[in-house]
Image (cartoon, rainbow, N blue to C red):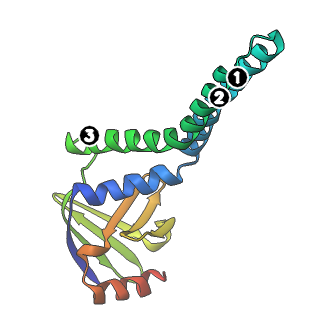
Amino acid sequence: MLLKFDLDADDWMEFHKYHLLNNKQFKKTKAMITYVVPVVFGVFLYYKYQDGTLMIENAIMVVLMSALWVVFYPKRLESKALSRARASVASGENGGGLGENEIEIDQDQIIHKQAGKETKYNRESIKNITETDTSIFLFSSPLIPIIIPKKKVDSMDLIQLKKVLEL
């Protein structure tokens, strides 16, 4: 089976989004940052309560600030990380696979052709195959994907691709 498509920055960003939202380290960092600030505020309130200097207005303000932090900060952290990734793709640092791509898949190997580059993978070297709403990612390592955007592949080819990849 032969697939030809043009990979653009939006397709590459779909991979970044998938990777970011499924990355264990990012999840740990996001959870830590999200909940450390309210804990610090809670310790502050506790000591103010112990001193007898806690005013109800201050407590309400701190609780409200903590709730807003927990609700809004995780999305802000994700959007900032994705905007940094988009900037790196736009600057050319991280988007070497952009442009015309050709993927040939048979029972034994996958051949991925890009501008001036051809990579052959044994089927066994593909460690993970992931399907999202917009793309199919073939991973030979956790950070090296072959990105197949669904919107740029004919629907009949997409059905055949899923059969070949056993999705």
Residue designated by label 2:
60
The vertical placement of 152 against 37, above or below, is: below
Mark 2 burial class by Cα count in 10 Å: few <14, some 14-19, many 20+: few
Mark 1 burial class by Cα count in 10 Å: few <14, some 14-19, many 20+: few
Image-quadrant location for residue 64: top right
- Say which amino acid is labelled 3: Ala
Q: Confirm whether residue 47 shows in the render.
A: yes
Residue designated by label 1:
56
| Secondary structure found at label 2 | helix
Q: Residue at x 26, y 40 (%)?
A: 87
Residue designated by label 3:
87
Q: Confirm whether residue 36 shows in the render.
A: no
Image-quadrant location for residue 158: bottom left
Residue extending farthest right: 50
Contact, mark 2 vs mark 1 (Cβ under 8 Å): yes
Q: Residue at x 23, y 66 (%)?
A: 113
| Secondary structure found at label 1 | helix
| Secondary structure found at label 3 | helix
Q: Residue at x 72, y 21 (%)?
A: 45
